[in-house]
Structures are given as structure tokens and as C-alpha cells.
Amino acid sequence: MGDRKPSCLVICSSHKEGVCAQSFIHAFTLTNSAFTLSIATPQGIPVDFVNVDDNSRRWVSEFRTKSYASPMKLESVEASQYNALLIPNSPGALYDLVKHDSVKHILRAFTNDKKPICAVGFGTVVLAAGKLENNEWCCKGYSLTGPSVYELIQRKDFSTLPIIFEDFAKDNFASYTASEPGAVHVVVDRHLITGQNSQSTLTAVQNLILATNAR
């Protein structure tokens, strides 16, 4: 790759349930120095951050003033232009990314080329969109993690969640593991890196950088 930084596609939800501010900040801070980043959302709608606290509010405000804060349209993404894929913890992904046709094609391309994919927290549910040409799931046979049933059942909207990732992964022949709620838990299997929750973002993204640089 010479002196050029590898390129990383960051897929975020544009649903009102949004993207977890903490996970995004950690992911962006690490990857911005290691990659040339492109942020994409459905229809290019700006990211709506959730769980913003006093520590993250200023960062989010400053981020919104930058030109790179305006996402590109997910529908116009050419997967071949990117070396890595990152999906931060996005609760909104349950509603607008998990069945998105463009996501399916992006995941299919990354899987076929074995390019590094990193998904964290609710970002892991986006992997459910990855159906291959033979209609098998792109993560079949992989070891991975994501939000556990035990964690999700604490949510008031548990009964209406459109997908329970732990159940989906097991039903589609992946090897799912989880740690206790709030613990850092990252699983690396070949080119796939998954983190259970926002707390796992830093470790997961560090592995994404290592995996991309090793190619």
C-alpha cells in the first residue's frame, strides 16, 4: 500500500434509534489516523447520536461541523474501493440496516474477498443482512459475538425487537459466545472481528487496524 493509508468504510444507521456516541467516538478516534474514512448511511442522512453524555456532547458538536460528518449514500457505495469495513454500535441498525439491500451486497463482496470486517454491539446485527449467492449466511461457521439475550432482555422494548442476534447467529450455524454484561469481549475469526458491546469498541477496532495492515 506504500505510504497511502488504507480506506475504511464506516456504515452507520440513520434511524432515530441512532448510533451510540461512545462507540462511535472511540471507533472514529482510532481509525481516523489509521485509515482514510468514508461514513455511509441510508440515503446519506446525518447520523443521530444517542447516549450522549457531558463527556461526549462537545465532541459530537465539533464533529458535526466537519465536512466528513456529512455521510455518503449507502446506496452508492462501491465495496471494491475499500480495504476494511467498520460498523459501530448502532441501535438504529435493527430497523434500517439489517435488511438493507446495499448492505447485503457490501457484506457479500467483503466476504468473498476476505477483507476485514469489524462490527460492534448492535452493529453486529447488520451482519444478518449478509446472504451469499447460495443464500447461506456470510458468517456461517464463524465464531462471533454481539449483544446477548441476557443483555437485551433488560430493555423495555425487548418484546418488539425485530431481531435477536444471539438467536439468529445460532440458528444460522455460527458459533456465538458472550461475556457478562458490560465486559470487554471481542472475537476474532479470520477476517471477521466482532465486539459484544460499546465497551468492546477499542479492542475490536485495534484488531481491525492490525488485520488490515497485515494484508
Image: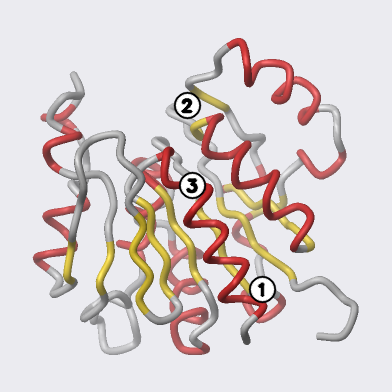
Image: 28 above or below 63: below
Of the two numbered discs 3 and 2 on the same chain, state the one appearing first in sequence: 2
Image: 59 above or below 182: above
| Residue to which mark 2 is pinned | 16
Between disc 3 and disc 1, the foreground one is 3
Question: Is residue 148 found left or right of 115 in the rendered image?
Answer: left
- Return the x and y of residue 180 as percentages of the image width and height: 19, 40
- Return the x and y of residue 42 as percentages of the image width and height: 56, 48
| Residue to which mark 1 is pinned | 78
The residue at the far right in this view is: 3
| Residue to which mark 3 is pinned | 201
Of the two numbered discs 1 and 2 on the same chain, state the one appearing first in sequence: 2
Of the two numbered discs 3 and 1 on the same chain, state the one appearing first in sequence: 1
At label 3, which amino acid type do we have? Thr
Q: Nearer the viewer, residue 44 or 90?
A: 90
At label 2, which amino acid type do we have? Lys
